[in-house]
Image (tube, helix red, strand yellow):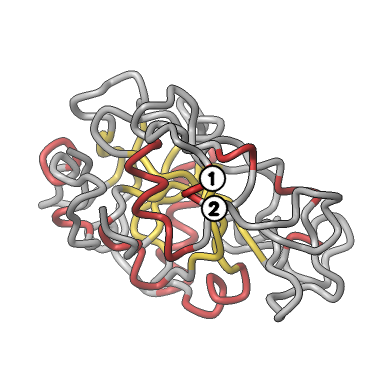
Amino acid sequence: MSDNPVDFGVIIHSTDQTEDPERPWAVCSASNLACGFFSDRISASVVYKGKTSAYSGGGGVVVRPQYARLLCGYGGDGGTRGKTCTPPGVSPSCTPGCVTGSDQGWGTWCDPASTANPRDGWCDGHPWRPSDMGELLSRDRFSPNYNEVILDGAYWNAMLPNTIEAMIASPDDPRAVEQHAKFLSTYGLTAEQVPLLVYSPRDFEAPFRCEVCGQSTSASSSMAGKNPAGASGDVSSLGYG
């Protein structure tokens, strides 16, 4: 299994109040008193055929992996909100959301060799290094729980709008179309370039459906062939399979 994020599957960030209040597709600014301590990281989940569970399952974005920097991963919910760095940001002694040096025994990386169970992706709650993500995802397919990957928040914002491959609408959320339109207007993009989708995790064959996708994009067909073993990363071939 590859350790390259492009090959993982579909990477979804679900809305979780760590976003910029004015730009929900961006990571919260460090100057924001309410959520600024999350400015150096953002959580996401990897989904693929046979594994559609993602945190909350509501609105959010599909991440373009070529423009994301992976910090670590967990074989479940890593409880990462309390794993902060002071000052914020990646340093030799602190990786936000992963290993912070202040976790009282939890601040060490997962050692894949420490468990004899080839299906154990939890690793006693320890974060997996980016170089071990292929092994994590190989084990993750045996777990019913969603996984969690931590992405670099500063890099995410620096790479905008390229970070966003598609936006995801919460079911029956009237603001989704408005926010999608605002994103497109802000960056001079079209719905064919960055579509608005609905994600249905219980639809194991075709969990993505087009809501606003322009004239020539079909989410049901374009998002139907991607898995942790292979992916292209662009909207035209994004999928899970």
Q: Residue at x 39, y 50 (%)?
A: 11
Q: Nearer the viewer, residue 172 or 17?
A: 17
- Which structural element holds mark 2? loop
Q: Nearer the viewer, residue 179 or 47?
A: 47
Q: Which residue is mark 2?
A: 111
Q: CA distance from mark 2 to mark 1?
A: 5 Å
Badge 2 amino acid? Asp
- Which structural element holds mark 1? helix
- Residue 89 is situated, as x and y percent measured from the top left of the image, at 72, 75
**Residue 56 vs residue 212: left or right?**
right
Crowd rating for badge 1 (residues with CA inside 10 Å; few <14, some 14–19, many 20+): few
**Residue 53 vs residue 25: left or right?**
left
**Residue 135 vs residue 147: left or right?**
left
- Residue 30 is situated, as x and y percent measured from the top left of the image, at 78, 71
- Residue 71 is situated, as x and y percent measured from the top left of the image, at 55, 65
Q: Which residue is mark 1?
A: 114
